[in-house]
Amino acid sequence: MARKVSILGATGSIGQNTIDLISRASQEYDVVALTGASNIAQLAQDAIALKADVAVTARDDLLEDLRRALDGSGVEAAAGAQAVTESAARPADWIMSAIVGAAGLAPGLQAARQGTTLALANKESLVCAGPLLMETARGAGTKVMPVDSEHSAIFQALIGEDLAAVERIIITASGGAFRDWPIEELAQATLAEASSHPNWDMGQRITIDSASMFNKAMEVIETREFFGVRPDQIEVIVHPQSMIHALVGFSDGALMAHVGPPDMRHAIGFALHHPDRRHLPVERLDLAAIGQLDFRAPDEVRWPALRLARETLEAGGMMGAVFNAAKETALDRFIVGGLGFTEMSQVVAQTLDHMSTHCDHIDAKMTLDNVLQVDHLARKAAKAAAVKRAG
């Protein structure tokens, strides 16, 4: 019997890699829902090719465009944030949550209520509301599978192991586009320069986050929320080749490393087929040809995002939602040209400081409404900080 699958965020890089794997064995899958935003042509093309039940754009204003693109296909069209969340409630055996940003939180929570499998690529769900998401999943009997390459690697290294024997978890970072730049030149980095990754083929936003190390900062918080380890057990190391995705250190001094090519189809495929391992169309590493693997300690002067992530963990409550909202707002301003590259971390730091005085919001019970309220307040504060910097 075909497995029912949905892909939330189908037109992004994770969604497209998921579709690539599903398309290679389309007879095994019954596609329920595909969601996207502005790329209507891609969304419609994939929905028709995979015979999806419904295609949803988060953009209300693009509903008619989607309907025209799907005309005659038999695929239902819908639009709007509520429609995206409703699509996540359609019965499915496996749901990929790959919507970028805080917009993925409500659909991810809805998917977690299904009691099936949630493949989680939307890191903001854990950063903003990790306890809420994981408790929702546990209550419904939903299996959450991490799809970040680092967290998939940690998950795999922990199979059959006792979490109590874990001393440390090390996640690797490529260092992004500016890992070898002189620090004094970073302030002049352009959007085009920040949008080019040396190893991974990813979307623009995550590529810029890699250059600023905000992507890795988010993953530090994710590691805490997903695996329940203490913040002081989580380490980051710069590994330019991106071959080792994470390492787990145990009480006997051993390190278990996950090694593979920088290809997101590995983490996606592992989540798709778990508990089985199946053939994946990824590169097989030639270690002799690679020759050596390099590592270096991260410089928190170059990458202050890592320090800010640890401050966020120390603050607790809903400061993760503040961190993410400030990061997204600063990134938006950098992309449109209203903020310099190094000013993004300064805006995040100022927003964390400002919101730390709002204890009534930060320490409130973690519900979706309260998280969204904190998100709103933090975005407002971050926008004000960014505007002030722009003069």
Image (cartoon, rainbow, N blue to C red):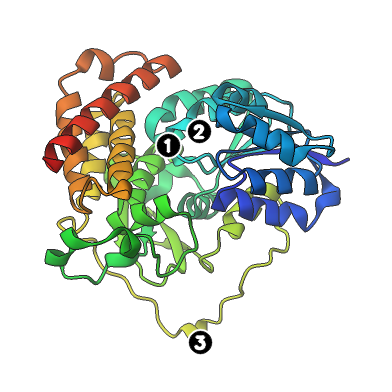
Labels 2, 3: front one = 2
Circle 3 Cα neighbour tier, 10 Å, few/some/many (<14 / 14–19 / ≥20)? few
Does label 1 or label 2 sit earlier along the sequence? 2
Above or below 128: residue 307: below
Q: Is 21 on the left or on the right of 164, as rendered?
A: right
Image location (x, y in percent) of residue 235: 30, 53
Measured Cα–Cα span from mark 1 to mark 2: 7 Å
Disc 2 marks a residue whose amino acid type is Gly
Q: Is residue 238 visible?
A: no
Mark 1 and mark 2 in contact? Answer it, CB < 8 Å. Answer: yes
Type of amino acid at the residue the image marks with label 1: Glu
Q: Residue at the spot x=24%, y=72% of the render?
A: 180
Q: Report whether 196 appears left or right of 3.
A: left
Tell me: residue 363, above or below residue 349.
above
- What is the count of numbered marks? 3
SS state under label 2: helix
Instruction: Tell me the tag on residue 328.
Output: none
Q: Quadrant of residue 376?
A: top left
Q: Which residue is mark 2?
A: 104
Quadrant of the rendered structure where residue 124 is? Answer: top left
Q: Which residue is mark 3?
A: 288
Frontmost residue, 169 versus 200: 200
Sequence-wise first label, 1 or 3 = 1
Secondary structure beneath dot 3 equals helix
Q: Which mark is residue 124?
A: 1
Q: Is residue 273 visible?
A: yes
State the separation of the CA atoms marked 2 and 3.
41 Å
Q: Position of residue 391 (x, y in %)?
A: 11, 40
Side (left or right) of 199 relative to 69: left
Could you tell me the amino acid type at mark 3?
Answer: Ala
